[in-house]
Image (cartoon, grey):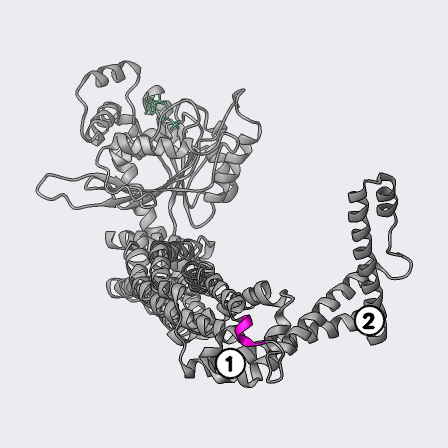
């Protein structure tokens, strides 16, 4: 029936990985005893190797979940090794290394905590061990030493109390040379198991007391335990120990312990004949007790797992409609969605759209140039007054306005169009990537989001210089000469009109806003009159100051500049500022009106040869040509490259660099996916456990005789 324990040990570790709830626990053997009772020596004798950390400085600070797995001895060359599943160190065949690892894990518990209840999972595979699960706990402290906090004693007690609950089997370790009445292990066990139905007593150091004394302890008359006491001699006494040390290191020490125990108990056969003695007996006893305890738990654990499974299945149906996922499928879907989202977004970066964006930017520049060169020009009226009945002849004006137009055109073409247009598009791409990186599901994956941003910016950075140089190069001809044909001219005229209309509307809106703010039309009119008179005074004073400065009468200058023209009681300063702005908007509107009329005049309709009289049209056409050319080269040099590269970078920098565990971690960053995966895994594990339990139950039905009928 060894099969059962082994199977249930496997099931136990699956259940432990599902959760730590008590209802899903299969029995294990819990080893308790006071410090120096010989606890470690017993465990090592069972395993056949020294592997537990030694030292005075409280070296067991965490529970050790020790799972022993019996492996068949193949052709005598038996492999014995340990594994720490949580650490992923692989097979460790050197037991000194296991000892070192255990020591490190224990000492990693901060001194302030002293003990931790986080168990260390250690599995040992060997042909010399039975299938067993043992939990080694920190030893009870008899006398606290000075450097240990008072609470440590209680902490250990409560840690042990947690583990000695049902259904676990208690292995109470006591030394023969200490009165059992003083054994903290027996005391603790009696509290939770008064009849000793699940407690095995182990009496160590039998060699240190006279055989008849040892034998009477094992008889257990004073402190009876249903499962009885086993006497052992796991370590040689002082003088023998030195002899043993001198001998060569034995690969497995079970033989030595066995020989020692045989020698000791054999030589006192008259006392021990009917008692349980020896590590080998202990080992078998543990196997039997665990086996029957496991068998006893089979029914209740099957029921508990059944209930949990039903609940998990129900939840999985309700919450996820039985839809299974894997971390891999999530990652693949996420990457596909990312590429699809990106592809969709590229629809905002077609050539006409880029052209339109650039055009808006260039129109802004056109307006600036117009403002700079024309609108503040006092002679601007001349351009409009060149009607049929004009006194001014066009020929007289030509050189001046020709010069102006050349200046305007070169201001526009040399304003850094290559750089500005490239940056405009690159900024658009960056904004697109940022919005993807900040949105679902990458808000859950900050590292991946950073990467996306990082590599897309890198692609852009790499192309930025090349692209803006290329664009600048291609618009170079326009810096010298722009040819405009009839059709372009007419289009430009319409655009210029539209632009002016927009600008005029903007001015009117602003004026309406100001009107509203200051409290109506009349109020604004009187404010503006006031501001104008102020400006008039300022001008006069400036003129006087200039005159005074010229004649050199210092007093007069001081006197004049001291007087403030603004009367703060009359209008609040904010409204005065509003009125100043209103005047500017009005002036702008007047110019726009004037120029709109000019654009609609016969001369401007005539065609490209009127360019110097209609700079707005000409500049508009230039802006159009610049936008067209820029868009074309940005498309080739920047966008095509970016759209090609980005999805490839997703594959090479986001996906293929991930190994299995990273994929799992990535998927679990998303809380929804994590919950989904958790529930799914829980359900799958429970199903697996249920299947195994079911087959065990069936097996037992077959092998056990049917209950006898009365
Ligand atoms: P633990 O602190 O309970 O783990 O106890 P250890 O296993 O470290 O043993 C404490 C001391 O008792 C060590 O010096 C062991 O050598 C010694 N010891 C353990 N078992 C026996 C035994 O059966 N006979 C003798 N003579 N000494 C033992």
Task: From the top left corner, tell me how far across and down residue 589 is, in percent.
Answer: 68, 74
Task: From the top left corner, tell me how far across and down residue 286 is, in percent.
Answer: 32, 42
SS at circle 2 = helix
Task: From the top left corner, tell me how far across and down residue 395 is, in percent.
Answer: 52, 74
Predominant SS along the magenta part: helix
SS at circle 1 = helix
Q: Is mark 2 within 8 Å of ligand 1?
A: no
Relative placement, left or right, of 457 versus 528 is left
Write the residue at 82% across / 76% down.
521
Rounded to the nearest angstrom, the CA distance separating label 2 from label 1 is: 35 Å
Q: Nearer the viewer, residue 130 or 154?
A: 154
Write the residue at 57% across / 27% down.
150
Task: From the top left corner, tell me how far across and down residue 442 is, in percent.
Answer: 44, 61
Label 1 neighbourhood size at 10 Å, few (<14), some (14-19), many (20+)? many
**Circle count:** 2
For residue 234, which numbered disc appears in the image? none
Identify the residue position indicated by label 1 in the image. 493
Q: Is residue 218 visible?
A: yes
Q: Nearer the viewer, residue 377 or 654?
A: 377
Q: Is residue 614 visible?
A: no
In magenta, the rendered stretch is 393-397
Identify the residue position indicated by label 2 in the image. 524
Q: Nearer the viewer, residue 446 or 119?
A: 446
Q: Is residue 179 magenta?
A: no
Q: Is residue 394 magenta?
A: yes
Report which quarter residue 305 is drawn in: bottom left
Residue 149, compared with residue 429, is above or below; it is: above
Write the residue at 88% across / 49% down.
563
């Amino acid at each position: 029936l060894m099969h059962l324990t082994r199977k249930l040990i496997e099931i136990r570790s699956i259940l432990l990985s599902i959760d730590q709830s008590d209802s899903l626990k299969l029995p294990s053997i819990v080893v308790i005893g006071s410090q120096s009772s010989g606890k470690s020596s017993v465990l090592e004798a069972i395993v056949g190797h020294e592997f537990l950390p030694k030292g005075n400085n409280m070296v067991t600070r965490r529970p050790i979940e020790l799972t022993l797995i019996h492996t068949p001895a193949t052709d005598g060359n038996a492999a014995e090794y340990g594994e720490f599943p949580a650490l992923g160190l692989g097979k460790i065949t050197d037991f000194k290394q296991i000892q070192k690892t255990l020591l490190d894990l224990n000492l990693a518990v901060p001194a302030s905590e002293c003990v931790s209840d986080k168990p260390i999972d250690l599995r040992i595979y060997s042909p010399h061990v039975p299938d067993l699960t043992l939990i080694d706990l920190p030893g009870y402290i008899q006398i606290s030493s000075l450097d240990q906090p008072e609470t440590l004693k209680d902490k250990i007690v409560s840690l042990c109390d947690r583990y000695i609950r049902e259904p676990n089997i208690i292995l109470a370790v006591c030394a023969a040379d200490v009165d059992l009445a003083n054994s903290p292990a027996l005391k603790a066990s009696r509290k939770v198991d008064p009849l000793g139905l699940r407690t095995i007593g182990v009496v160590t150091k039998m060699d240190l007391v006279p055989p008849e004394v040892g034998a009477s302890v094992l008889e257990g008359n004073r402190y009876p335990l249903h499962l009885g006491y086993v006497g052992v001699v796991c370590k040689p006494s002082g003088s023998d120990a030195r002899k043993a040390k001198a001998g060569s290191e034995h690969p497995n020490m079970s033989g030595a312990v066995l020989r020692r125990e045989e020698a000791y108990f054999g030589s006192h056969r008259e006392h021990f004949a009917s008692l349980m003695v020896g590590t080998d007996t202990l080992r078998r006893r543990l196997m039997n007790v665990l086996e029957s305890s496991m068998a006893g738990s089979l029914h209740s654990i099957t029921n508990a797992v059944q209930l949990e499974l039903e609940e998990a299945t129900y939840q999985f149906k309700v919450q996820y409609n039985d839809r299974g996922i894997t971390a891999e499928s999530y990652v693949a879907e996420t990457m596909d969605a990312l590429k699809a989202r990106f592809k969709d977004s590229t629809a905002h970066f077609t050539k006409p759209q880029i052209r339109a964006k650039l055009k808006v930017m260039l129109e802004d520049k056109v307006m600036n140039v117009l403002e700079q060169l024309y609108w503040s020009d006092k002679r601007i009226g001349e351009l409009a007054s060149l009607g049929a009945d004009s006194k001014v002849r066009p020929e007289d004006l030509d050189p001046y306005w020709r010069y102006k137009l050349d200046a305007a055109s070169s201001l526009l073409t040399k304003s850094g169009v290559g750089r500005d247009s490239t940056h405009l598009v690159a900024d658009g791409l960056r904004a697109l990537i940022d919005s993807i990186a900040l949105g679902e599901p990458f808000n859950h994956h900050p590292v991946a989001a950073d990467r996306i941003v990082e590599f897309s910016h890198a692609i852009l950075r790499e192309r930025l210089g090349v692209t803006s140089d290329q664009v600048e190069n291609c618009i170079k001809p326009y810096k010298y000469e722009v040819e405009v044909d009839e059709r372009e001219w007419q289009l430009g005229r319409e655009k210029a009109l539209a632009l002016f209309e927009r600008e005029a509307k903007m001015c009117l809106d602003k004026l309406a806003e100001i009107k509203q703010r200051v409290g109506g039309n009349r109020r604004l009119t009187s404010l503006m009159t006031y501001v104008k008179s102020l400006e008039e005074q300022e001008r006069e004073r400036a003129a006087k100051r200039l005159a005074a400065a010229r004649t050199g009468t210092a007093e007069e200058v001081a006197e004049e500049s001291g007087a403030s023209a603004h009367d703060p009681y009359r209008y609040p300063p904010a409204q005065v500022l509003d009125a100043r702005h209103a005047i500017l908007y009005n002036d702008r509107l007047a110019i726009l009106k004037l120029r709109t009329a000019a654009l609609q005049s016969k001369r401007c309709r005539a065609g490209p040869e009127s360019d110097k009289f209609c700079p707005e049209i000409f500049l508009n056409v230039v802006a159009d040509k610049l936008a067209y050319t820029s868009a074309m080269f940005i498309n080739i040099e920047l966008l095509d490259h970016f759209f090609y590269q980005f999805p490839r970078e997703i594959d090479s920098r986001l996906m293929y660099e991930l190994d299995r565990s990273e994929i799992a971690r990535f998927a679990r960053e998303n809380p929804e996916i994590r919950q989904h995966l958790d529930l799914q895994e829980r359900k799958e594990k429970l199903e697996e456990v249920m299947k195994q339990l079911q087959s065990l139950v069936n097996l037992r039905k077959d092998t056990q005789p049917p209950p006898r009928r009365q």
